[in-house]
Amino acid sequence: FASFGRAGVPGLLLEWKAQEKEVIYGLGERFDALDQAGKRVDLWIVDAPGQGDLNDLTYFTTPILYSSAGYGLFPADNPEGIMDLNSGGDGFHRYSRPGSAMTFTLSLAPNLREQLMDRMRIQGPVKTIPDWAWGPWISKNSYENQGEAEAAIQGSIDRDLPVAAIVQEAWKGSSEDGNFNNFNTDYRWPELDRYLNWCETLGIRNVLWQVPILHPASPHYQVAAEKGYFVKKPDGSISHREHWLAGFANIDFTNPDAVKFWQDLVRPALKTSVAGFKADDGEDIKPDDVFFDGRRGWEMHNEWSYLYNQALTDLLAEEKVDGMLWARSGSLGIEKTPGLWAGDQFANWMDYRSLLPAGLSASISGAPFWSHDIGGYIDTPTPELYIRWAQFGALSPLMQYHGVTAREPWLF
C-alpha cells in the first residue's frame, strides 16, 4: 500500500485462500462472535463501553488467529491492522498493516489444541495468578472512604458471603487527578493502619485502581515533563489526551526511566494487605504520537497497553507481593499480564450476552484469567438480570461485582 490506515503510511498485505466452511478463532476479545470467519476486524483497541454484539470494537486485540482448516497465524508484533477474513465472499483472507516488514510464524497443527500449544511455545506460558484471586472480588465506582469500604466488607461478613479482595479507587485522594498521595489519612482513610490490618486478619486483599496518566495540575507532572517522560507529538511537545480524561498526558513506557518514575510513584501504596492493581484505560494513543524508542503511535497504540500492564506487574514482583494485575486493555504478549476484565457494559441483556464470546475469545488469545463486572458497569440492573449475571460471574475464571451504582448482592 502507498498509504494505509489512520497514519497514512506505506503498508503491507498478506493474502491467502479461504477454505470452505472454515471457522476462525482468536484476534483478542471479541464481543460480536467467537467465530470471526466472514468478518472484517479492525486491530485497534478502543474504549468501547456498551458495544454489546454491535461491531468489532474491543479493549483487547491481537493478530493471532486459529483456523479449523489446520493452521494458526502468529504475527510477531501488533501494530494497527485489518484482518479481513473473506468478508466480501471472494474466497480470500487478507491481513493488511502499516510498515515495510512483517514477521510471523505459521503453525500447521491440525486442530485448535495443538495450535494453542504452538502459540504457547512461541509466546511463552501464561503467568499464573495467586490462589486468593479465585475468590469473589467486591467493588464499586467507588468506595469513597474507609467507612464505605468497611461497610461493604462487614455487610458481606454478616451475610456469610466470602470476600477475597476489595477494589479501591479512592486511594489517590480524588478519583482521577493522579496526585499519588497513596491514601489520604486525614480525610478518606483516618485509620488506615487499623483498616489494612483488619483486612489482613480477614484474609482480604486491597486492589488499587490505576490509570497510566498524569494531569497538568499534579505535583509530579512538571517533573515528568522536564525529564521527557510523556508520549509526545511529532513536533516534540507533549501529546495530551483527547477522549476519556482529556487533557491528561500518557506516560511513555518505552522509556526505562519513565517506567521507574511511574513505579516509584505507586510503590509507597504497597502496604499491608495491598496485593494488586486494577489497571484501567490503556487505549488512548494517537496514530502520529512519538515514543522515546522512536516508534510511532500506529506501531504502539495496541502495545502501549501491554507495556503499562507490564510495568505494574514488574512492580509487584520487585516488592515480592503475592498479587496480580487485572487490566481492561490488552495486546500481543498479554500472557505475561493475564488478568483481563471486559470493560464497561451497560446493565442490559444484549451486553450480558456479548460476554460469552468475549470471554472465550480472550481466553484462547492469551488471557484465560478473564471476567466482567457483575450486573454491568453502566446503569442499574433488574434483579433478574443481576442474578443471571452473578451466576455467570461465579462460573467465569474470575468473579467481581462492580458498577457505577451499588452492586452488593443483598440489594438485589
Image: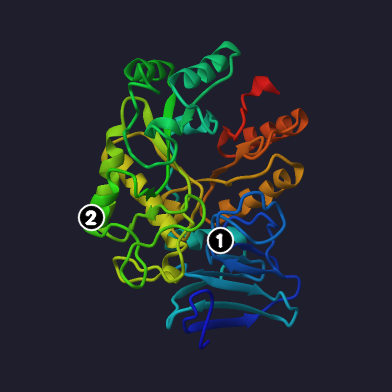
What is the three-letter code of the residue carrying label 2?
Asp
- Specify the amino acid type for callout 1: Glu
**Which residue appears at 32% of the width and 66% of the height?**
237
Determine crowd level at label 1: few under 14, some 14-19, many 20+ residues with C-alpha closer than 10 A: some
Q: Are marks 1 and 2 in contact (CB under 8 Å)?
A: no
Is 90 placed above or below 369 here?
below
Q: How is the image coloured?
A: rainbow
* Spot occupied by residue 30 in the image (x, y as percentages of width and height): 63, 57
Residue at 47% x, 53% y is 246
> Residue 232 shows which numbered tag?
none
* Label 2, residues with CA under 10 Å away: few <14, some 14-19, many ≥20: some
Of the pair 377 and 214, the residue shown nearer to us = 214
399 and 266: which is toward the camera: 266
Is residue 149 visible from the viewing direction of this image?
yes
Residue at the limit of the structure toward the front, as seen here: 217
- In x, y percent, where is residue 151? 52, 16
Work out whether residue 387 or residue 115 is closer to the camera in this orientation and state it: 387
261 sits to left or right of 109:
left
Can residue 76 be seen here? The reply is no
Question: Which quadrant is the C terminus positioned in?
Answer: top right
Viewer-side label of 1, 2 = 2
Residue 257, numbered label: 2
**Compared to 336, does 168 lie above or below?**
above
Q: Residue 353: give x, y in percent of width and height.
A: 73, 46
Left or right side of 10 for 71 = right
Q: What's the distance in space between the residues labelled 1 and 2, CA to CA?
A: 40 Å
Which circle marks residue 114 in the picture?
1
